[in-house]
Image: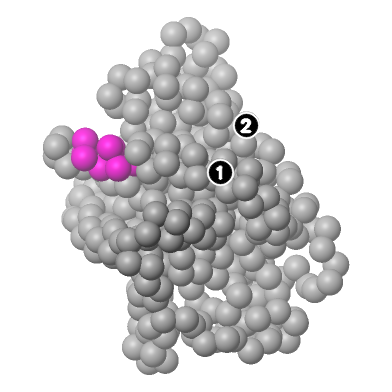
């Protein structure tokens, strides 16, 4: 019995999806939103889930790298999966932002430094090693929703830096934070444009079967929403020269991105209906479902912050109402995750295996665009 459980744990570590840090992202951003709305108890509970899952996933990731390095490297070099590693950056910064509101400013600074360093390294290494250095197939054919996680990671650096601004101990510190926030926010804008073009071209030039339209496509909306949140936080930063130059532009673009994020929601819901109801793709737990919950929560918090920063009460009301939609989605997915892990680890049961996908025109499995298969 013990040997069987140990084997199942090892299989779980071997197949751990790099995008699982989306659980940290979803829990953390909902904790922020609930605290802003005055629900301290719920916020603290979700902060516990956020911090606990971050610690556990960090340990499991290190374990996976040490014990199953081949699988780790293969995933890192796969352009359809490698961008999932950016969820570590975003999850760490979301946790850092939440800790700021509890007075843990030192921990926030440490986490921001760690996430910022990883963001810089991955931002150069992943596009080169997983995309540009691979000449066996067109780059566009590998694009999918996970590519927007790079945008989310960039904007999360801006959010965490802006969160530290009110407690910066010196004028020099505020100047540094403003440069980091504005620079990473600006990089995120260009990355969104690049990812949007490439993902759109992939959808237009290559067949997109229902099985290919995976949950991470919701990150396209989440990337818009965190761009709005970062913009709102930058608008509220101290009046340093860097912020003073861009404040009007940032505020205006924040509203533009909020409008586009709002427009995307019905399209993504319709895509999910087409995938699951029209074409019968089974809806069961997979780690990539957290890539749906996080955008929902981020859209809510972004609306609340934008309404406050730019004096747009209607936008704030939409965000406050949407927070409960996101919390409901979190509860459903979290319950499904616990049941899934119990079946896998305690009972040794697996969900039904998906049908083997046919090859797409680029030579890879058409269904292989999902970076977080059921695990």
Where is residue 109 shown, x and y percent of the image? 47, 22
* Position in image of residue 76 (x %, y %): 67, 54
Q: Nearer the viewer, residue 359 or 189?
A: 359
The reply to whether residue 178 is visible in this rendering is no
Residue 55 position, x and y percent, is 42, 37
Percent position (x, y) of residue 15?
Answer: 54, 60
Q: Quadrant of residue 304?
A: top left
> Tag 1 or tag 2, which sits nearer the N-term?
1
Left or right: 194, with 283 as reference point: right
Numbered badge on residue 143: none
Q: Specify start and end residues of the magenta stretch as a single range.
A: 43-50
Q: Of helix, strand and loop, which one carries label 2?
A: helix
Asked if residue 74 lies left or right of residue 292, the reply is right
Residue at 49% from the left image edge and 40% from the top image edge = 58
Question: Which residue does the numbered mark 2 point to in the structure image?
Answer: 117
For the N terminus, the image quarter is bottom left
Is the magenta region chiefly helix, strand or loop?
helix
Question: Dot 2 surroundings within 10 Å: few (below 14), some, or many (20 or more)?
Answer: few
Q: Which residue is mark 1?
A: 63
Image vertical order of residue 159 relative to residue 351, above or below: above
- In this rendering, would 14 be left or right of 50? right
Asked if 1 appears above or below 26 in the picture, the reply is below
196 is higher (above) or lower (below) than 85: below
Is residue 108 in the magenta section?
no
Q: Looking at the image, which residue sits at the far top?
A: 170
> Distance of mark 2 from mark 1, alpha carbons?
21 Å
Q: Nearer the viewer, residue 61 or 32?
A: 61
The residue mark sitting in front, 2 or 1, is 1
Q: Residue at x 40, y 73 (%)?
A: 350
Which residue is pictured at 70% across the width and 74% down the height?
Answer: 141
Category of crowding for the residue at label 1, using alpha-carbon neighbours closer than 10 angstroms: few (below 14), some (14–19), many (at least 20)? some
């Amino acid at each position: 019995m013990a040997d069987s459980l140990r084997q199942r744990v090892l299989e779980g570590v071997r197949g751990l999806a790099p995008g699982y840090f989306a659980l940290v992202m979803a829990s953390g951003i909902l904790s922020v939103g609930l605290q802003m709305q005055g629900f301290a108890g719920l916020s603290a509970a979700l902060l516990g889930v956020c911090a606990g899952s971050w610690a556990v996933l960090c340990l499991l990731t290190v374990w996976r790298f040490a014990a199953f390095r081949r699988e780790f490297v293969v995933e890192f070099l796969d352009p359809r999966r490698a961008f999932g590693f950016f969820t570590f950056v975003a999850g760490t910064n979301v946790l850092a932002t939440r800790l700021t509101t509890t007075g843990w400013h030192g921990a926030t600074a440490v986490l921001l430094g760690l996430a910022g360093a990883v963001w810089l390294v991955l931002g150069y290494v992943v596009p080169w090693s997983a995309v540009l250095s691979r000449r066996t197939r067109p780059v566009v054919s590998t694009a999918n929703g996970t590519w927007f996680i790079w945008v989310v990671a960039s904007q999360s650096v801006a959010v965490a830096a802006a969160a530290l601004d009110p407690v910066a101990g010196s004028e020099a510190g505020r100047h540094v934070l403003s440069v980091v926030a504005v620079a990473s926010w600006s990089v995120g804008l260009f990355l969104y444009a690049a990812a949007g073009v490439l993902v759109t071209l992939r959808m237009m030039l290559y067949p997109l079967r229902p099985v290919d339209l995976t949950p991470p496509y919701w990150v396209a909306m989440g990337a818009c929403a965190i761009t709005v949140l970062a913009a709102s936080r930058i608008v509220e930063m101290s009046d340093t020269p860097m912020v003073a130059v861009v404040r009007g532009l940032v505020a205006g673009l924040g509203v533009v991105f909020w409008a586009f994020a709002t427009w995307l929601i019905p399209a993504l819901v319709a895509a999910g209906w087409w995938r699951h109801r029209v074409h019968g793709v089974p809806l069961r737990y997979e780690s990539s479902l957290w890539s749906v919950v996080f955008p929902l929560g981020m859209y809510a918090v972004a609306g609340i912050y934008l309404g406050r920063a730019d004096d747009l009460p209607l936008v704030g009301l939409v965000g406050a109402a949407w927070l409960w939609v996101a919390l409901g989605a979190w509860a459903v997915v979290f319950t499904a995750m616990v049941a899934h892990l119990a079946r896998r680890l305690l009972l040794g049961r697996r969900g039904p295996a998906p049908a083997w996908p046919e090859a797409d025109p680029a030579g890879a499995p058409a269904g292989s665009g999902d970076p977080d298969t059921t695990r």
